[in-house]
Amino acid sequence: MTDKDDTYWREKLTPEEYHVLRQKGTERAFTGKYWDTTEVGTYTCRGCGEMLFESDSKFDAGCGWPSFDKPAAAGAINEERDTSYGMIRTEVLCQNCGGHLGHVFPDGPTETGLRYCINSLSIDLKKET
């Protein structure tokens, strides 16, 4: 699905979603829809619907963004080196559409030791019924 052009994404996404998913933007901390959500379900990519994270891997990192300790499945996300803003970080992207999700850090409190810090604008919660 990474073959979609810019016009496709601008028509599909809101301006805010487009900024995060396609231009690698970041929403302000503590403002996103899911930063403090505890509802049970599956988090999918807002761009393409790919399953990314399960609610049982979500935790409160105190950072103001939804945080997860692992992807829903191996290969659900891609990682790339990000040296923007004078920092060295690991960017995470949807493996299906290439949408920017956020970053992963090696400071998570669970057995994985990882904290996937994800923008609410890049995900959608499919609640378990």
Image (tube, rainbow, N blue to C red):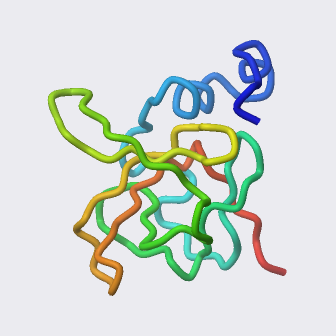
> Which residue occupies the foreground of this view, 74 or 125?
74
- The relative height of residue 58 versus residue 93 in the rendered view (above or below) is below
Quadrant into which the N terminus falls: top right
Look at 73% across and 54% down and name the residue there. Answer: 50
Look at 36% across and 47% down and name the residue there. Answer: 29
Residue 31 can be seen, yes or no: no
Q: Residue furthest top?
A: 7
Q: Position of residue 127 (x, y in %)?
A: 76, 71
Look at 22% across and 68% down and name the residue there. Answer: 107
Look at 67% across and 79% down and name the residue there. Answer: 40
Q: Is residue 5 left or right of residue 24?
A: right
Residue 7 can be seen, yes or no: yes
Numbered-mark total: 0
Quadrant into which the C terminus falls: bottom right
Q: Quadrant of residue 89?
A: top left
Q: Position of residue 99 (x, y in %)?
A: 59, 37
Q: Is residue 70 left or right of residue 99?
A: left
- The relative height of residue 109 versus residue 79 in the rendered view (above or below) is below
Q: Residue furthest right?
A: 129
Q: Where is residue 62 in the image (x, y as percent from the top left)?
A: 29, 65
Q: Which residue lies furthest to the left in this view?
A: 86
